Image: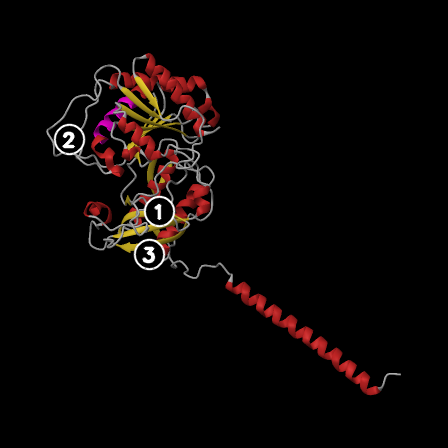
Amino acid sequence: MISRHQRIVFWILVVCILGMGALLFYERERDRKRVQALGDATPLDAPTASTEAVTLYLASDQDGSIAAASRQIALPTEITARARALLDHLNAEYALDGSAHPLQSGAMVDDVFLLPLPIVGHTLDARTSSDSSGTSTSLVSTDDANTLQPQTVGGELAVINLRGSFVNQHPSGVEVESLTLLSIVGTLHANIPQIEQIKFLVDGQPRETLAGHADLLRTYPSRDTSTAAAAVPAN
Amino acid sequence: MLEKDVTLALAFKLKSLLQARGLTVQLTRDNDTPMEPNSPANPLTLDDRAGAANHSRAAACLLLHATGAGTGVHLYTSELDAAAGEPAVQPWLTAQAAWVPQSQKLEKQLATALTRARIPLVTSAASVRPVDSLTCPALVIELAPSDSDDPGTINDSSYQQHVAEAIATSLVFWQGQVQAPVKLGAPAASGALSTSGTGDAGVTP
């Protein structure tokens, strides 16, 4: 025979257990919502409200040409976000069906960094020889003047950190790789004039080539690339 | 279809045609060795290839590539700005600068021959290692399919032979025209690198 006070204790314990269970469930749900909120990839820097005309330099594999094309696009006002958005729009054009320079869809660029020229202290060229201490950078020498000096006051070096996924899926070939780089260079030149020189990284690291051919270690001057390629059709 | 197989096939065809015309040809690869640049399995790096081509004092250095994109043949010279002459000490990464005018002349000559052969052509400048380190008239030759809708046509032996014949014909005329750039800081030197009729054509597949 169970005494009355034992039954009371038993039911109190049952209520406590259910209460603890409910509390744990509530806390778990709250934490899950908090973690989901942290992992939300929605961009915080929303584009400006109005669209604007930008010039994209679009490549064609058929004749090796690059032609300027105007598009109405909403872009962020912050300059590096603007450069990144421009390049992602460029890649989106190439990912469309029937593109003359077909590339995989997806984001092209992880980050864009702008460094004011001249670069004082060390070169960013990964091919420079290591010094005795084993560091891979070297002091800027006078013959680097064309590479690291600004052409105008306020000129900047853009470091484009390409996504590994974009580079690894890029078609291989001298023409197709060169056209991608010239398209990037021309588009940045047309829309962000303070960029005078451009260097490329892949996932934050220097890489020799884009997909086995076009040199990614050199510094590219920002210029109008629309007339860089000339086609001679067969008669 | 691998690029290394297509370029090797084209290189052999070109070599045969050039040798039949009395030119000496030096290949930097004549078998199916690993092609990963700077890998331990492949002792010849891109810089090694440029060094070998430079030491051969070739009348023309051709870097052969292949792609499934586009159509016909793509010719590229170095993107370097042309220099007035060859300095006594040449920076490795810009050694081609003094030779850019000669390379452009060679490109024009090959373009004419390929156009006459009715081969679709794209000419441009590109930054492809190790072309900037070559001290000879240097061209990147990229073979693309003859039919843009069928990438498999790049393996067509008769198409490759047709392209090789156009290039070989042009190089025979080129061997007597090549001029070494002026040496800067030294007495002017001029004249053909090879006038004996056995000019070297460094072919880099």
Q: Amino acid at mark 1?
A: Phe
Element type where label 2 sits in the image: loop
**On residue A200, which mark appears?**
1
Query: Which residue range is magenta in the image?
Result: B100-111
Tell me if A32 is positioned left or right of A232 in this view: right
Q: The numbered mark 2 sits on a residue in which chain?
A: B
Q: Amino acid at mark 2?
A: Lys
Tell me if B119 is positioned left or right of B198 in this view: right
Which quadrant would residue B164 be assigned to in this image? Answer: top left
Q: The numbered mark 1 sits on a residue in which chain?
A: A
Please identify the quadrant where the C terminus of chain A is shown: top left
Write the residue at 31% across / 12% down: B21
Q: Position of residue A216 (x, y in %)?
A: 35, 42
- Mark 1 vs mark 2: tell me if same chain: no
Residue position for label 2: B183
Which quadrant would residue A59 be assigned to in this image? Answer: top left
**On residue A213, which mark appears?**
none
Residue position for label 3: A79
- Mark 3 vs mark 2: tell me if same chain: no
Q: Residues within 10 Å of mark 3 (few under 14, many from 20)?
A: some
